[in-house]
Every structure is written in structure tokens, then in C-alpha cells.
Image (cartoon, grey):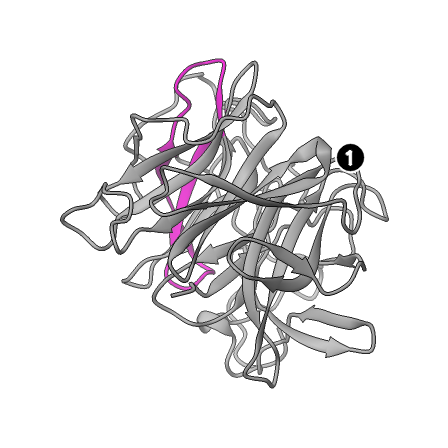
Amino acid sequence: MRSPQLVWGLATAAGAFAQSSTTAAVPTGTPIAGNYTGPLRPQVHFSPPKGFMNDPNGLHVDRNGTWHMYYQYNPTDVVAGNQHWGHATSRDLYHWTNQPIALFPPNSTSGIFTGSAVIDSNNTSGFFPNTTDGVVAIYTLNTATKQVQELAYSYDGGYSFTPYSGNPVIDVGSNQFRDPKVIWYEDHWVMALSYATEFTVGIYTSPNLKDWTHASNFTHAGLLGLQYECPNLVEVPFKNSSGTGWVLGIGINPGAPLGGSIDQYIPGQFNGTHFTAFDSAARIADFGKDNYAGQWFFFMYYAQSTALSRAVHGVPIPVRCTMSQSPCGARCANPRAPSNTPPRGLRPRRRGPDRDWLEASDGAQEGGPW
């Protein structure tokens, strides 16, 4: 079956709350501690315990209803570098619990870059003969000379991973080839990934997550900017209709109309190997300087379309996503939930009258707009 998805978009926030590590040692098997009461520390949006975060990665929800968010993470400094996959979990997409770092680079000259995670419920990979809940992470390994796509698999629900001995699973010899997003389409896996400076999204297919075949390219559409990054391919329902369409999301970094980086999306149709756009228009997901590197949740067990957003140092709250027809063509819409039924039980918080930000002590507001 096709897997319904969720999106985690992204909005870059100021990093004044980030804390430098006092040691280059990165702990294993235990969450990194952080002070969440300090000045300018976000109280609604997720932020890492300390250090630097950027792209959300590997978003999925498990059979028990726990949401998993991995993210690009440098635990030893407040700038990009030394990239790991941080990990946090939530039951409601609002209250997050920091988990131990999930993926580590193999050496000091490489990094675990952006990617995705899937639940291999049919054991197509052969990694999971005794479970239907095995998690496979698909990510870019960045080295000094090139970027390749690798796998790691988890027997404990995505809390720790073992690198696949047959890595890399895709190597085209390029140093601008990254950000694999994997989904299930009918009877095979589909990967969208970026040939960044060629302004191209490559589409690959696989029966087992290990052996990939190049199927097609989608290229030079919408805004170009400096490079394409973080492609996403997702089936989205049309509002007030039983039909669906597909959306190809592409990060532009930099090159936003107002400066900075931005996400664009392209509505169209997908047949399992080729994406065809409805038209040539560029559509912006969020018209600011800092909404970038959006990701869609992968899940096999639920049928909703909920959109979310990420930041360089924090992750905003979720919104639900549908498509609608307008005089200008298909558009993604993020409708506000009724005030008495916020998604996943979210409740708004009311700030104090003397400030325009939230503090940790601000309580939940019952009812009202959010």
C-alpha cells in the first residue's frame, strides 16, 4: 500500500539559547542534558539540549503511537559540523523527550547528513526476520571527497542503529548528492534525492532498500537559488474530495525571494517512477527567510496528513496539510483546527500581558484560537 505521510516544515530561529559543549566527547547510550529554563529558550518549539541542530531527519510514527524525530546535530559546538543524528520522541507532537544520539559518524572526517527512516513491516530488507516493526534509516554519509547513500537498521524501535555491512547502497561519485527521502509506493520503495548543484531531484526504486535502480529525474522547476536540497515526495488528499495528488517539496538554500533559505512545493502526479508537475509555477511553503528543509513523517498505521516545521535551533508545532484547487492551480493548505480540537491534543498557551514571548511557567489556555 502507499503510506500516508506527514510533513515537518522548518523555520529558522535565533540560536542565542545554544550552549557550547565543554568536551569533544559525545556520550553514547544516554540523553545529553540541557537547560530548558534559560533566557530565550523556546518553550513551545522543540530545541536540542545543547549544541547545534538543523534539518529534521527520519520522521516516523511507530505502531504504539510514538512519534520519532531525528535531526542533524552537532553535540560539540554551536555551528554545523561533526554531524550526528539527534533523537527525540513525543506522544502528541508537542511535548518532546530527548533520547540518546541515534547515529554516529564512522570517523572524524565524515558526517551523518540528512535522510529518512522507514518501518520495514514486510521485512523487504531481510534485516528483521522476527519482527514487523524494524526501522531502517537511509541517510547521506558525507566524506572529504564525496557523498554516498547508506543504510542502518534498528532492532529496538529506532533508538539505536547498526550500519549495513554492504554500505554504500548508492554511490555516483559526486560530492553534491544527498538527502534521501524514502517512501513506499504500492509494491516497492521509492527514493527522492538531490543532485544539489544540478537543480535535479533523482528518483530511484528498490524492492528491498539495498538495491536501487535509477528511474527518472525531475529538474529545473520553480525557484532554483544556489542549490536544491531535502526533496520530499508525498501523496496529499484534496480538500473536500476523495481524490489525491502528489507534492514534490524542494529546499532552496539560499535563494528565497526575501533572502535566506526557503521551501517550495510542486503539485503533480506520480506513477511510481516518474513525477509530472501540474504546471510550471513556483509555490512557496512559507513566505519568510527561514522556513527550510521541511520533512514529511513516514507512517504505515495512520491515515492523516499533518504538516510540521523545523528550525536551525528549534522546531515549530504541527499543522495539517491538504491540497485544494484555486484559480491559480493546486495549492497546499494548512487549515487551522477548530479551537476545541487542536491536532494531537495541543492546547494554546497564553503569554503574560507585559511581554510578547512565552515562559516555561505560562499555562495552557483552554479554548480560543491557537
Q: Quadrant of the C terminus?
A: bottom right
- Residue at the bottom extreme, as displayed: 240
Q: Nearer the viewer, residue 263 or 265?
A: 265
* Residue 12 point in image, percent of width and height: 67, 45
Identify residue type, mark 1: Leu
* Residue 300 point in image, percent of width and height: 36, 63
- Residue drawn at 37 percent across, 26 percent down: 167
- Residue drawn at 72 percent across, 78 percent down: 325
Is 50 positioned to the left or the right of 258 in the image? Answer: left
Q: Which quarter of the picture shows residue 269?
A: bottom right
The answer to whether residue 217 shows anywhere in this view is: yes
- The residue beneath circle 1 is 226
Is 182 positioned to the left or the right of 291 in the image? Answer: left
Q: Nearer the viewer, residue 351 or 59?
A: 59
Would you place residue 227 above or below residue 67 in this image? above
- Residue drawn at 56 percent across, 69 percent down: 236
* Residue 3 point in image, percent of width and height: 42, 63
- The reply to whether the magenta stretch includes residue 243 is no
Q: Residues within 10 Å of mark 1 (few under 14, many from 20)?
A: some
Magenta range is 83-112
- Residue drawn at 80 percent across, 48 percent down: 223
The answer to whether residue 311 shows anywhere in this view is: no
Is 366 positioned to the left or the right of 103 in the image? Answer: right
